[in-house]
Image (cartoon, rainbow, N blue to C red):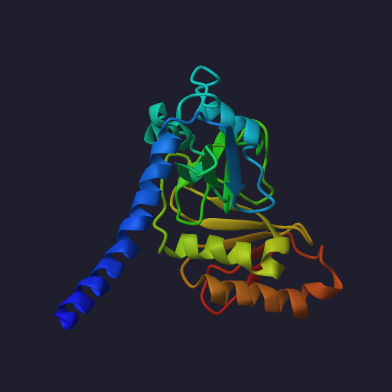
């Protein structure tokens, strides 16, 4: 009988460890359901240098421009999935999560898109149409320009990207764009990448203001290394000596 009693007591203690927390959570949930939203807590993450959206912009998205206020509304009547969907419709937002905390707040966590490059439509004479264009993210997807903020990033031009909504993230072109963004030397040196309708690339540089005729993005690391060696051994004494450098041909550099 004693052994049976000990077994029952141990079973009861283990059950209490499960039941009591569940009761506590249930009571807290019941209390929160009848509570009103105390505040909207907005956290915006992403590249520290990117400011596409501020807290006011997120607030307007969450409340449908103030038409569906959240502060003061009963928490159980707020559809968090609907709020999340309203915010996520903005193409400048990469990811959004909406939940409520134990203090009665609605918490909105937002990740902004990170621009890897910016495509700008240009006329034949090279003039930019600033109202047109889009950004390109690290996954090769495009997203719209912002009315309030312009990110400093690699400029893309040419007809190749005018009608493309997504680039293959594993393609040589995307790998090259990522490399130009990550390498300190080339990030500072290359100001613009022009890609024509056939995917042929030309780079415009800062020092010397040269046009580098690159060809396709295949073997881009070898081609960039050829240009860098040419800079060090030929142009380092006179950056304005040539205006055009052609590296599209194997094992040779043609200059004008």
149 vs 237: above or below: above
Q: Quadrant of the N terminus?
A: bottom left
Residue 55 versus residue 7: which sits nearer the camera?
Answer: 7
**Residue that lies at the very extreme toward the front in this rendered image:** 1
**Residue that lies at the very extreme toward the top in this rendered image:** 67
In the visual, does 48 lie left or right of 237? left
Give the residue displayed 30% in from the left and 69% down from the top.
13
Residue 108 versus residue 228: which sits nearer the camera?
Answer: 108
Q: Position of residue 252 (x, y in %)?
A: 58, 77
**Residue that lies at the very extreme toward the right in this rendered image:** 237
Q: Quadrant of the C terminus?
A: bottom right
**Image quarter of residue 164:** top left
Give the residue displayed 82% in from the left and 62% down from the top.
240
Q: Is residue 175 visible?
A: yes
114 vs 216: above or below: above
Q: How many numbered circles does the render carry?
A: 0
Residue 14 versus residue 249: which sits nearer the camera?
Answer: 14
Q: Position of residue 213 (x, y in %)?
A: 59, 61
Give the residue displayed 64% in from the left and 69% down from the top.
183
Give the residue displayed 50% in from the left and 49% down from the top.
196
Q: Position of residue 40 (x, y in %)?
A: 57, 34
Q: Position of residue 203 (x, y in %)?
A: 63, 58
In the visual, does 99 lie left or right of 16? right
**Image quarter of residue 9:** bottom left
Q: Is residue 216 visible?
A: no
């Amino acid at each position: 009988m004693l052994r049976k009693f000990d077994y029952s007591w141990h079973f009861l203690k283990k059950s209490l460890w499960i039941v009591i927390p569940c009761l506590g959570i249930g009571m807290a949930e019941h209390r929160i359901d009848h509570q009103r939203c105390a505040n909207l807590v907005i956290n915006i993450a992403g590249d520290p240098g990117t400011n596409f959206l501020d807290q006011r912009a997120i607030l307007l998205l969450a409340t449908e421009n103030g038409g569906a206020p959240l502060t003061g509304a009963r928490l159980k009547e707020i559809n968090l999935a609907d709020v999340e969907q309203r915010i996520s419709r903005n193409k400048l937002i990469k990811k959004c999560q909406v939940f409520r905390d134990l203090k009665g707040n609605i918490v909105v966590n937002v990740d902004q898109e990170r621009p890897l490059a910016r495509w700008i439509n240009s006329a034949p004479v090279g003039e930019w149409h600033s109202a047109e264009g889009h950004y390109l993210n690290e996954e090769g997807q495009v997203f719209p320009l912002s009315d309030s903020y312009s990110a400093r990033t690699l400029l893309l031009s040419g007809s190749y990207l005018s009608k493309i909504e997504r680039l293959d993230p594993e393609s040589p072109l995307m790998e090259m764009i990522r490399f130009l963004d990550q390498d300190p030397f080339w990030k500072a040196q290359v100001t613009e990448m022009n890609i024509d309708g056939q995917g042929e690339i030309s780079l415009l540089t800062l020092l010397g203001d040269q046009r580098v005729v690159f060809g396709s993005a295949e073997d881009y690391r070898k081609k960039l290394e050829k240009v860098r060696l040419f800079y060090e051994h030929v142009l380092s004494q006179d950056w304005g000596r040539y205006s055009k450098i052609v590296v599209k041909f194997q094992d040779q550099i043609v200059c004008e």
